[in-house]
Amino acid sequence: MMKPGKLYGVGIGPGDPHLLTLKAKQVLEQVDVIFVPKADKKKESIARSIISQVISTPAEMLELVFPMTKDQQILENFWALAVDQISQRVSNGQAAAFITLGDPMMYSTYIYLLQLIKKQHPEINVETIPGITSYSAAAACAELPLVEGGERLTIVPVAHHLHDLSRIISDSDTTVLMKIGRYLDETINVLEELGLLKQAVFISRVGDKDEYIETDLRKLKGSGYGYLSIIIVKPEKFGSCYGRIDI
C-alpha cells in the first residue's frame, strides 16, 4: 500500500510577498502541488499572484473555487469537492499545500477543509504553517500599537456583528474590524455615533501595491473600499500614534 503524502496549510500573509515566512517559502518550493483558493473562477487568484512573485521553483498549481455566499449548503458542497481533490493527491503519495491569505487559522476556508480531512481522512498527515495576519501588518504600517499592558483586543467580523457593533466597540480597548465588505458606510456611521471617527484608522489592501491608509473615514463613504480592508479603533493613547500615520 502506498504511503500517503502530506498536506500543508500555508499562511502567505496579507499581501506583500516579502512577508512570507521562510518556512512557508521553503514548503511551497518543495511540494508537488499547490492548491490555490479563489472566489470566482473568472478572476485571478490574489493568493496565487502573491506567491508567484517569490517562489523560485513553482509546483503544479490547481485552483479551487469557493464562492462568496452565506448559503451553508453551497459552501459545504464546494468544501467537499476541494477535500476530494486534495485527499486524492495526498493519498497517492504527493506533498500538497493549500495556501491562504493571512493566517490559516483565522477566518480561513482552510479551517473547514481541515475539519473535513480529519474526519474523512484521518490517515493524512497535516501540518499548518502560520502566516502574518492583515491586522498585524496594518498596525505596523500605521505605527499603531494594538494593545499595551493589560489592554484587551477584540477582533470583529463586521458582516456578522453589525447589529451589535456599537456595544462591542464600547466594551473593548482596541477593536479590529474585519470582513467589512459592503458594510463600510454602516460601520462608519456606527463610529460616528460613538464619537470615535478620530480614533479610527482605515487600511485597505495592506502590503499590496494598491495599499491605502485613511484617517478621515468620512471620505470613505460611498467609496466601496470595504473589500480586503480593516479598521482599527483605539480610543486610548491614539493621539500619540495618529501623528505618525503617513497618508
Image (cartoon, grey):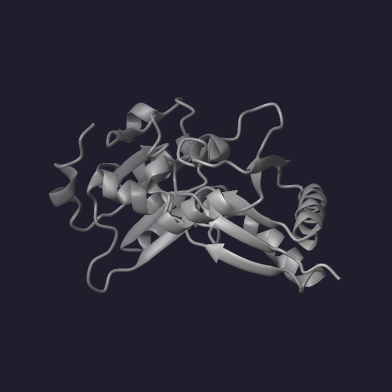
Find residue 126 and report its image quarter: bottom right
Q: Residue at x 72, y 40 (%)?
A: 65
Residue toward you, 189 or 173:
173
Question: Would you place residue 36 above or below residue 166 in this image?
Answer: above
Q: Residue at x 38, y 40 (%)?
A: 206
Residue toward you, 105 or 236:
105
Question: Would you place residue 15 above or below residue 83 in this image?
Answer: above
Q: Is residue 99 left or right of residue 3?
A: left
Tell me where residue 148 appears, x and y as whole percent. 23, 66
Q: Is residue 77 left or right of residue 225?
A: right
Tell me where residue 96 appears, x and y as whole percent. 66, 55
Q: Is residue 180 left or right of residue 127?
A: left
Find residue 141 and report its image quarter: top left
Image quadrant where one finds the N terminus = bottom right
Question: Would you place residue 75 above or below residue 3 in this image?
Answer: above
Tell me where residue 98 appears, x and y as whole percent. 63, 52
Image quadrant where one finds the C terminus = top left
Question: Number of callouts in the render?
Answer: 0
Q: Residue at x 34, y 46 (%)?
A: 138
Tell me where residue 23 appears, x and y as whole percent. 46, 58
Is residue 163 shown to the viewer in this render? no
Q: Residue furthest right?
A: 1
Residue toward you, 163 or 219:
219
Q: Residue at x 37, y 45 (%)?
A: 191
Is residue 234 shown to the viewer in this render? yes
